[in-house]
Structure formats: structure tokens, C-alpha cells
Amino acid sequence: MDAITVTDFMRPAADGFPLSMQLTTAATATSAVLISSATGFPKGFYNRVARRLAERGAVVLTYDYRGIAGSRPDDLAAMKMDYPDWGRLDMPAAAAALGEAAPGLPILHLGHSVGGHFVGFMPEPGLIDRHAFVSVGTGYWGRHHRSYNPAELFFWHGFGPWSLKRHGYVKGGGLWAGTDLPRGVFETWRRWCLAPAYFRDELAGRLRPHAFDRVTAPIRSWVFTDDPIATPTTARDLLGVYPNAPAEIVVRRPADQGVRRIGHDGAFRAGMEPLWDEIHDWLVAG
């Protein structure tokens, strides 16, 4: 097996904002995989899957969206941005960096949660050949598991607004277990998650320009029966914003993977290596 090399670097987005990125690769590479994180998850959360994919012959790029972890400015409260900037500006910069690191190889994409939502905000989504979505579903609270509703409604109406008022951003830890979130992320995310159509009704106006109808690469979406957010219903709803992409949903139980729990983030934790191999094999099959 080739030795795995990990390289950290900074890369500016098109507007000049510096983004923290990491390449994980073996000496012999046959594919290039971009991993796009869920909201509030630092790129380091995906180190295990990145290494596994590299062992299978992929050049893998992980990155922190602006405002998150290694791409967090010193004064987060003063940061001006909107949630879709992650798709419009950060994803294209990461894809370009991966293309430079793996010239001539097709760019494949593994998106976790919101990492699958924002492909259509990329100005040139055709740069990516295939999309593996994991735990990707709309954020509207009313279609999530009922047991999860009290916590998310308190986050939207209580903890989040309180944290914004106190800190100028949503502080990580405690109720919100993710990283600190910029105001522009929380406010737009909240607006969408309180709307039955999520962001779909905004595509005709407020969210222009976008390229959701120009996403034509195949999408396979993996969801898990114990995930309270990305259910088969919310996964279908989300895929509806990609009308011209051939798409399919794969539903799995934790027992199918030999684990007790997967939930919304467990697909990337230790013990899920067979799933990562399955995702790799599907991505490179195209």
C-alpha cells in the first residue's frame, strides 16, 4: 500500500476570502474526491474517510467553509456573509484546488448534509462528474422525526437567537454541538428550516443566480433509518431541486452496517469503512 500524504494549505475563494483546505493522497492516484462538510462540522471530522478513500487510490480534498474552524476569522461577530456563499464561492474554490492537485482526473463529490444542498449554487456544477450524498435531506423541521422537533425548535427560537444577541454569532458547545456559526449562516438556515419548502420557493427570486437546473451529474443519496433529519421523505424533497440529475436513494438500517447507531453524522465515524468502500466504488464506477 502506498504511503498516505496529508498536506494542509490555504486557498482564496473568488472574492479573496482565505479557506483552510487539506489534501490526503497516496503516491498513485486514479480519482479525485471532494468532501463537502455538514453545517458546523470541521474538515477534520472527515479525516478517517479521507484516508480510506486515499488508500483506494483517490486524491481527497477536505475544506472548511468560510466562518468555520480553520476558515474562521478572528472577529466572527463582525463577519458579513450569507449561507449560500458556501456553494457560490467556497465549493468552487475547493473544486479548483482539487483539479490542480489531480490534473486529468475526474472530480467526484461526497457531500454530507448541507454539502449536498449547495451544489446548485456553484457557477459551474458540471465540473463534478458524480455526487454521493450522505445524510442529505431538507431542513424543514416539520418533516423530521417528531422526537427531534423540540430540540430543533428550541435551537431556532431560543438558543440560536439568544446566542446571536449575546455573542454576535452562534457559539458552539452545549446545545449546539457544532462549531461556532456566523450570523449569516444561522439566520438564513433558520429561515429555510422554518419553511415547508425549505429553500425551494426562494430559487425563483431571492436565491438567484443559481444553477440547480444545470446539475446533470448522477446523484446517489444514502440515508439511514435512525437519522431524524435526512429521512427518505426529506431526501426526496431535496433531490427535487436537481430536476435534471439522475438520482436514486439508498435506505440503510444501522444493523445493515453492523453498528447500533448511525444518526445524522455516524456515517463518517469509525466502523463505517464498508460504507466508505461502497461509496468509493459507486463514485469511480462512472
Image (cartoon, helix red, strand yellow):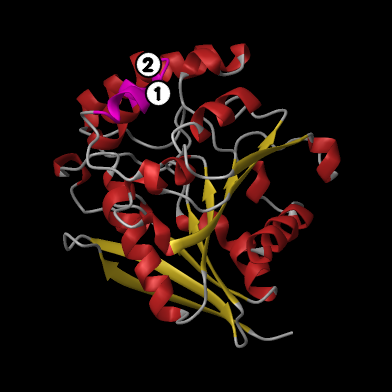
At horizontal 56% and vertical 78% (from top left) the residue drawn is 25
Residue closer to the observer: 233 or 60: 233
Horizontal relation, residue 188 to residue 63: left or right:
left
Horizontal relation, residue 116 to residue 208: left or right:
right
82 over 215 or under it: above or below: above
The residue carrying pointer 1 sits among few (fewer than 14), some (14 to 19) or many (20 or more) residues within 10 Å by Cα, namely: some
- The magenta region covers 190-204
At horizontal 41% and vertical 63% (from top left) the residue drawn is 127
Q: Is residue 122 in view?
A: yes
Identified by mark 1, the residue type is Tyr
The residue carrying pointer 2 sits among few (fewer than 14), some (14 to 19) or many (20 or more) residues within 10 Å by Cα, namely: some
> Which disc number belongs to residue 195?
2
Where residue 240 sits in the image (x, y, percent)? 49, 31
At horizontal 24% and vertical 62% (from top left) the residue drawn is 13
What residue would you read off at disc 1?
198
Q: Are marks 2 and 1 in contact (CB under 8 Å)?
A: yes
Is 66 in the magenta? no
209 over 128 or under it: above or below: above
Q: Quadrant of residue 91?
A: bottom left
Is 200 in the magenta? yes
Where residue 118 sits in the image (x, y, percent)? 39, 44
235 over 9 or under it: above or below: above
Where residue 245 sits in the image (x, y, percent)? 51, 45
